[in-house]
Image (cartoon, rainbow, N blue to C red):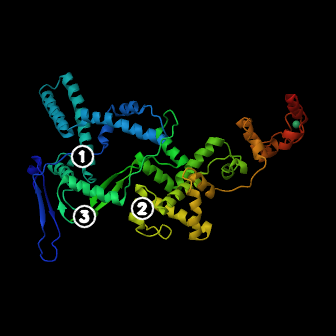
């Protein structure tokens, strides 16, 4: 509505057309001119151009070394928060007013090149031009990176960097980034910035939010490792999610040209990377297979596994090693999400699913559409799995009530529901006595399962199968543990 010069003076101008109604074919129009643009606090935003700075990696590394007491997720949040200030300082020192910086250094380069033109044999000048040229290139790359991120225009290429059109586009986007008029619930439009903000907050508070106190942080003190992975891993162990991570920025996108009331804006939830990684892992089977494989290698190394993984994942009392079967654990976590949706549990995401996807339908009757998120689809696969396991939907609904009744042990009870079952083994308590060194228990466990690599089981290797101690033709498990005279004497000696 107004031109660039108007904007450049720091002035604003917005026209908002309302609907014409039934009596007239003219639309009323609200024009706001000369409004002072108030700069409110913007959320912290990471600019990709920072990463190109030579100090960037060191800066992150030194500031990451912060002592934080608390859970892995809490540590991650704290450390990320701690990074904001040094990054802002980096921005202030090296990237503020990136365009004028880039222009200035470009002018310097031109001047230096001119000097060199008049004095082509001067080596110092050569070197000077080379340095300044490098500087110019890096700054203009940063500038491009900055505007690329600001304009969110993917098709713009490098050559568009300095055009007036491009800069105006960014400026316009910035101006558009503000809702100037909104119809209040009593249908009266308002242009007051405070009232517009209040209107949105009330609307979303009613739709999504209620205040809730933070979960207390359990004190476990661990030195820093790969903090991000550790926090993710921890989530898959205890299934809890820190409020700080659940917090998201909601971007409002107008649904059409004529946006009048708060409801005319489509909210987009901008989830953080932590959130995204977790949902990806929960939704993807291949990741689970990879995690299982890592665990398998951890236990057996490069050797051939002596006991099948599914048996290892049984509890010790059922003849396993008590490892968690990640597939079942994943099912349990997803089932928990399903249950939270069923219970309309108080979280932003659940309310979101409830409003946008279910839209009044019960979670047990709903079926996902083709384009819905993979996580949602997966959750509804789990739902069908539970229903088929239980026989009827009603039985399925009744059963989980018991799993989740106790919030603390909820996930492990659910895990118990999905995991593979084995028969109780009477020998288990004897093998896993607390005073037996774990390594010995492990060998004993292999022995009881008949999986120790005794010579009789290695016959395919074409080796001497005689007992190495007494020379009896075949070394079997029973021989080594119970029959071999020499070994039996030895153990008797030790007992005395
Ligand atoms: Zn022997």
**In the current view of this chain or complex, which residue is farthest to the bottom?**
23
Q: Measure the alpha-carbon separation of dots 3 and 1.
A: 38 Å
Q: Is residue 349 above or below residue 108?
A: below
**Residue 62 in the image: x percent, y percent?**
39, 30
**Residue 491 in the image: x percent, y percent?**
86, 32
Question: Does dot 1 land on a helix, a strand or a loop?
Answer: helix
Q: Nearer the viewer, mark 2 or mark 1?
A: 2
Residue receiving disc 3: 185
Q: Depth check: 24 or 381 in front?
A: 24
Can residue 430 be seen?
yes
Residue receiving disc 2: 353
Q: Is residue 213 above or below residue 134?
A: below
| Mark 2 close to ligand 1, CB under 8 Å | no
Residue 128: image tag: none
Q: Depth check: 424 or 175 in front?
A: 424
**Residue 140 in the image: x percent, y percent?**
23, 39
Question: Does dot 3 land on a helix, a strand or a loop?
Answer: loop
x 65%, y 42%: residue? 299
Q: Measure the alpha-carbon separation of dots 3 and 2.
A: 25 Å
Image region (quadrant) for ligand 1: top right
Q: Is residue 112 above or below residue 367?
A: above
């Amino acid at each position: 509505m107004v031109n660039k010069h108007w904007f450049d003076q720091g002035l604003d101008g917005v026209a908002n057309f309302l609907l014409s109604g039934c009596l007239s074919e003219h639309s009323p129009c609200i024009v706001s001119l000369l409004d002072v643009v108030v700069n409110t606090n913007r959320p912290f935003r990471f600019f990709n151009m920072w990463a190109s700075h030579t100090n960037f990696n060191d800066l992150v590394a030194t500031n990451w070394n912060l002592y934080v007491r608390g859970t892995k997720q809490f540590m991650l949040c704290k450390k990320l928060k701690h990074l904001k200030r040094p990054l802002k300082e980096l921005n202030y020192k090296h990237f503020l007013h990136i365009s004028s910086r880039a222009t200035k250094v470009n002018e310097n380069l031109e001047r230096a090149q001119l000097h060199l033109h008049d004095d082509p044999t001067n080596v110092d000048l050569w070197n000077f031009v080379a340095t300044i040229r490098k500087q110019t290139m890096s700054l203009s790359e940063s500038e491009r990176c900055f505007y690329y991120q600001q304009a969110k225009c993917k098709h713009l290429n490098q050559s568009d960097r300095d055009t007036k059109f491009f800069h105006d586009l960014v400026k316009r986007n910035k101006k558009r980034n503000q809702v100037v008029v909104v119809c209040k619930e009593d249908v009266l439009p308002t242009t007051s910035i405070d009232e517009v903000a209040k209107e949105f907050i009330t609307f979303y508070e009613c739709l999504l939010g209620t205040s809730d106190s933070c979960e207390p942080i359990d004190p476990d003190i661990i030195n820093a490792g790969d903090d991000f992975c550790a926090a993710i891993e921890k989530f898959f162990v205890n299934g809890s999610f820190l409020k700080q991570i659940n917090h998201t920025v909601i971007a409002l996108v107008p649904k059409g040209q004529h946006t009048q009331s708060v409801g005319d804006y489509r909210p987009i939830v901008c989830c953080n990377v932590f959130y995204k990684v977790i949902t990806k892992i929960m939704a993807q089977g291949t990741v689970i297979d990879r995690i299982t494989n890592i665990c398998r290698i951890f236990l057996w190394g490069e050797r051939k596994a002596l006991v099948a993984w599914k048996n290892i994942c049984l509890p010790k009392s059922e003849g396993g090693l008590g490892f968690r079967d990640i597939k079942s654990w994943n099912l349990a976590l997803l089932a928990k999400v399903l249950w939270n949706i069923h219970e309309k549990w108080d979280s932003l995401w659940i309310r979101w699913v409830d409003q946008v996807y279910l839209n009044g339908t019960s979670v047990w009757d709903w079926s996902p559409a083709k384009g819905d998120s993979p996580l949602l689809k997966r959750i509804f696969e789990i739902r069908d799995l539970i229903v088929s396991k239980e026989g009827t939907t009603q039985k399925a609904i009744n059963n989980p009530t018991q799993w989740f009744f106790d919030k603390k042990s909820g996930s492990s009870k659910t895990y118990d529901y999905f995991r593979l079952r084995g028969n109780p083994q009477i020998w288990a308590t004897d093998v896993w006595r607390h005073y037996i060194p774990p390594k010995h228990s492990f060998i004993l466990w292999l022995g009881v399962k008949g999986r120790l690599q005794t010579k009789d089981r290695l016959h395919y290797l074409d080796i001497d199968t005689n007992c190495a101690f007494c020379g009896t033709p075949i070394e079997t498990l029973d021989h080594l543990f119970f029959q071999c005279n020499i070994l039996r004497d030895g153990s008797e000696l030790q007992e005395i």
